[in-house]
Amino acid sequence: MPANQPSVLVMGIGNYLMGDEGVGVHLAQLLEKENLLPEGVDVLDGGTGGFHLLGYFEQYEVVILTDATLDIDRKPGSIRLLKPRFSSDFPRALSTHDIGLKDVVETLILLNQMPEIYLFAVSVNRVQQQCTTLSEPVQKAIPELVRQINGLIATLR
């Protein structure tokens, strides 16, 4: 990676065992398996978040998150790009992992080590217990999500 380009991490967050709630994890696995990101951009399956991710946020200048959000007013599979600056800027998530992620952001703010964060929020309207597949509308959103992430990365470089 050239010295003038920021270090970038794409991190998928979610619970793989809860259907659409695991869209971020499904995406991270796809990005890595199919090598769908530009050279020099790292990808991480962040699982359900938590303080074990703190080092990754400290290590990169830009962190691009992908997570499911409960948006009953939006169609499942809708994608929003947000630029949260504070933990309160994160949309409502579906499970307890949002608490860990918000705690990580609060800690980074306190340590004055906050990277530039972008969040691709994928709308879902239900959680399927013990299900490792995505619903059809969320699965169909994946190619567009990949396109938007690569578009954002292009603007950062």
Image (cartoon, helix red, strand yellow):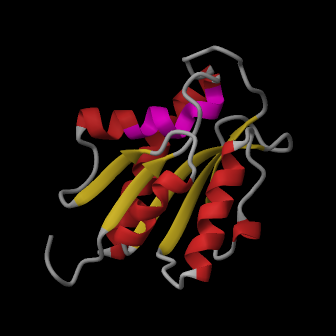
Q: Residue at x 64, y 76 (%)?
A: 85
Apparent side of residue 144 relative to residue 71 in the rendered image (left or right) = left
Q: Residue at x 20, y 61 (%)?
A: 40
In this view of the protein, which residue sits in the foreground, 72 or 43?
A: 43
Q: Residue furthest right?
A: 73
Q: Is residue 21 visible?
A: yes
Is 100 on the left-hand or right-hand side of 9? right
Within the magenta stretch, is there residue 22? yes
Question: Which of the 4 image quadrants contains residue 103?
Answer: bottom right
Q: Is residue 28 above or below residue 52?
A: above
User: Is residue 84 in view?
Assistant: no
Q: Quadrant of the N terminus?
A: bottom left
Instruction: Name the residue: 23% across, 56% down.
Output: 38
Residues in magenta, as a range: 20-28
Residue 144, position in %: x, y? 48, 43
From the top left corner, tell me how far across and down residue 116 is, in percent. Answer: 48, 75
